[in-house]
Structure formats: structure tokens, C-alpha cells
Image: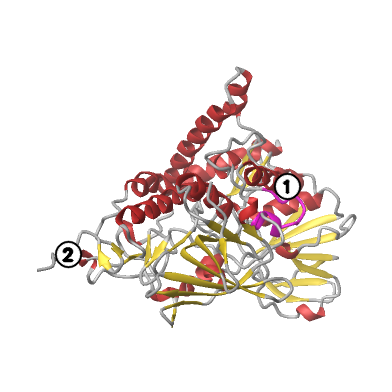
Amino acid sequence: MATAAVQTAAATHVDVLIVGAGISGVGSAYHLQNQCPGKTYAILEMKDTFGGTWETHKYPGVRSDSDLYTFGYRFKPWVGTPIASAQAILDYMGEVIAENGIGEHIRYGHRITSCSWDSKANLWTVEASDKRGQSHTFTCSFLWMCQGYYDHEKPYIPDWKGMERYQGTFVHAQLWDPATDYTGKRILVIGSGATAATVIPAFAEKAAHVTMLQRSPTYFFCAENKNELADRLREVGIDEPTIHRVVRQQIMHDQDLMTRRCQEEPEVVFEELKELVRAFTGKPDFEFAPHFTPKYRVWQQRLAFCPEGDIFRAAVEGKVSVVTDTLDTFTEKGVRTADGTEIEADIIVACTGFRLSVMGDIPFKVDGQPVDWHDTVNYRGMMFTGVPNMAWVMGYFRASWTLRVDMMGDFVCALLNHMDRKGARRVEVALREEDHNMPLADWIESDNFNPGYLMRGLKDLPQRGDKPEWRHNQDYWAEKDQIPTTDLDGSEFLYDGVRAGTKVAEPA
């Protein structure tokens, strides 16, 4: 267990400063104190409690859209249903914090206002303010950015015409107030992604009617919210750690197969997805066109999980209707679409996605110079050229986010231990000789993964190269073999300003 942070009147110093107490920050803290037990650390969290995204979102029915056997941590077995409520995930995270003494390292209510690196001191200086407006200074040798990728306070809302005319209640799902009573109300949900797929069936239980207005359809994967392999292993008395490990491996195998099939035979996969909808609704003649026939390839955007086919069953029961069109303008009573259709609603809920927030929108400086992230090149999506002693956790879109949290925990801890063995105080990545004239491009190709929030924010993200080392390829099944075997003395690493593998001349 790491010892307590060193605090002075001027600043609090730790070896490692973790930003964010969400799923990434808590997992990273666990790995740090177990794999680098001599390191001191602190976690800065702007909220008043842990949980990150699971604390932010409070809309009806909020739940995971990844299975908890892979979204849960590798080191703590998950024993609930595969798709879990936000509260169940928070309870799980709370157990991790309590069982591992992580809570004493978390500084809640601390909003970071700047991060500055000094190469002479080999030190990060992090300024933060608390809820009372008081300033706090932290210094650290290594900065571990675990704050996620989107703005938790300002969601993305298109600049729709006539919004000021609407007389009902308008809210973005990310800002939903749980005290809102929607019983017997007419609800319009704008959007069709994972959030809409979650909130619409929940609204339908008590609302008079729910309408989903979408510009374009989404792919849905319908399945029962259970794992037959896990249930069978429990039935025969297998211990939970073994169940967790085996089921996790099975799910990752299945996801790998599904991802490859979506690329190689997307039409066949779509037909299989349709059959699942027909099975759960009991309607072999369920009509998919035009509202459930997306224009993009399966998994080119997130595949929304639909437990027990709930959104489709609500539609068949007449509780939910779908309109596929663009929104022309808000009216006093609702909205009007491009084709002139009027949709009246008492409550309008925007499920229009996130606003990308790179590094928490925190101003960064390196040796006094502001960092423009788009001027940097990313190393495997976790380190960046020209920015020493820092790692950023950016998870997967087609696999559970936490798979990369665990993987990066191993990598960062191995890097820190390697630095200690070398006696190095600074590490950074730099393009190698063989990367000379390597073409650079935006963070990810649009034909790989293209949700709106990512496409809108590409110019804020670091660039990628055309080699595996210089990109976040979104392929867990390749990275699970590549990252653990990284040569930390490869020529892409510079230690104390000297490229790894460089022979230093002996003094005469």
C-alpha cells in the first residue's frame, strides 16, 4: 500500500496524480498501489462522490450497455446480471474502493484549472479549486488522466430552430432530474442511440405515450439479460473468481467473432439481428423499414443492447412510435419535422449525445508552451509526443471500456517500475527514424467508427500515424497481445531526453 501524500503549505506532492474517480480512475488506482506499492498517489475528482458517468446520468432506466463480466474489473468478480443498473455499478465500485483503501486517496470536489510540466524539475504542477473557491496546488512526477472523454456538465444539443417557443419541459437526458414526474405525459425522445434505447422503454412504463424522433436508425442487439455459462457454472459449484475469468474470456471471444463478422458479412449479421427482434416481439412479420434499417455498416457506430427486446416490445404494444425525419423547428406544443409532421409532447428529451472533452478541457503547458493536442501524435492512444510523464485512459467503443483500464494499468505500472530501474525521472514518446515522413491523419477513420461526438471533435484530438504504435486502433483483440509485450526500451521512448537504445559516449 502506498504511503500518504506529502503535504506542505505550498503544495501537496505525490509520485502519481490520477485525474478522475470514475471507472478508469478507481481501476488505475488499484493497479498502481498493487503493482507499484512504493508510489504515493492522490485522485482528484471534481464531483462530490465517485462513479463518473454512472453518477452523472440519472435518467429513467440508466444502465450499462456493456456486459459487466468485461465492464467489471479483471480483479473483482461480477455476480449480478450482465447488463446492470447504474446503482449496481456504483455499489460495485464502492466495494472496490472500500476493500482496497482507495477512498483515503480521493480528493472530492476538486476541479483542475491547469496542468504545467517543467522539464528542469521533471515535475507536473496541477492547480485546482474546491467548491468554496479555494485554490489548491499539487505537484507530481507522473500524471494519469482518467477523466474520460466527454463533458459531464454540457451535453451536445443541436442549435434547433424555435426552441424558445416550446412551452413544455425540455431537457437533455444527461441533465435529467430524477424528481421529474412523467406519469401520464406525452414524451418525445430525440435520438436513437444507446441512451434512447435505454430511456424509451423506461418512459413507456408510466408515460401516456413515447415518440422517438430519429434522423437515421440504429442497430439493436436483443438478448436476455443473463449469461447461461455463468449460471451453469454457479449451479455446479464453481467459485466466483473462476466464473468471472472463464465467462469474461468467453464473452471476449464472442465479441471478437462478432466484430469480424460485422466487417466481413454485415448483411448476414443484420438479418440475424432482425430475427432476434422477431423472436422477442413474437411477430415474425415485424416491419423494419424505414425506421429500423440503418444507413451505415453494423458496428460502424455503437450497437445498442436491448435486453429482452424491450424497446421493440413497447412499440408492438403501442406504447412507443417512431418517426424518421429531420427536425425542422420547435413549436409551442412540440416539434415539426421536415415533412411537416407535427409531434406534440409535454416533455421533450434530447438524446443527442456527448460533447467531446479532450483531457477534461484543462489547459496544459509544457515548459511554458500551451499544448494543442491536435499537434501531437498519439502513441497507442495513451501517450503523446511532446508531453512527458503523462498517460491518458481512452477505452474501447466495440469492447468494454474497462478492458483497456486494466491493460493500461499494467502498462503504466510497468513503465513506472522501468523508470525506477533505469533511474530515469522523465519519459516521453517521439517518432522514430523509421517514422520519418509517416503520413498523419485524424484520430480515427470515419469508416472505422463515426459517432457524431467523435466526428465533431476530431480537430481537438491528437493525430494518428499509419503504424500500430501511433494510433488507437480500437482493436482490443490485437492490443491484448501487443501492449503487454511492448519493449519499454524501444526507440520510441525517450528517458531523461535520451532515446532508448542510444549508446552514450563514455567520458574520456
Residue 368 drawn above or below residue 480: below
Residue 485 drawn above or below residue 301: above
Question: In terms of secondary structure, what is the magenta stretch mainly?
Answer: loop
Which of the 4 quarters of the picture holds residue 346? bottom right
Residue 87 badge: 1
Residue 454 drawn above or below residue 481: below
Give the distance between the C-alpha atoms of the residues marked 2 and 1, in whole angstroms: 55 Å
Q: Is residue 203 left or right of residue 396?
A: right
Residue 478 drawn above or below residue 431: above
Secondary structure, mark 1, is helix
Residue 315's x, y, as percent?
A: 75, 48
- The residue labelled by disc 2 is 504
Instruction: Bin the neighbour count of mark 2 within 10 Å (Cα to Cα): few under 14, some 14-19, many 20 and up.
Output: few
Residue 466 in sight in this render: yes
Q: What type is the residue that disc 2 sits on?
A: Val
Magenta range: 51-63
Q: Is residue 321 magenta?
A: no
Residue pictured at 79% horizontal, 56% vertical: 210
Residue 393's x, y, as percent?
A: 49, 58
Question: In which quadrant is the C terminus drawn?
Answer: bottom left
Residue 348's x, y, as percent?
A: 78, 66
Q: Nearer the viewer, residue 243 or 319?
A: 243
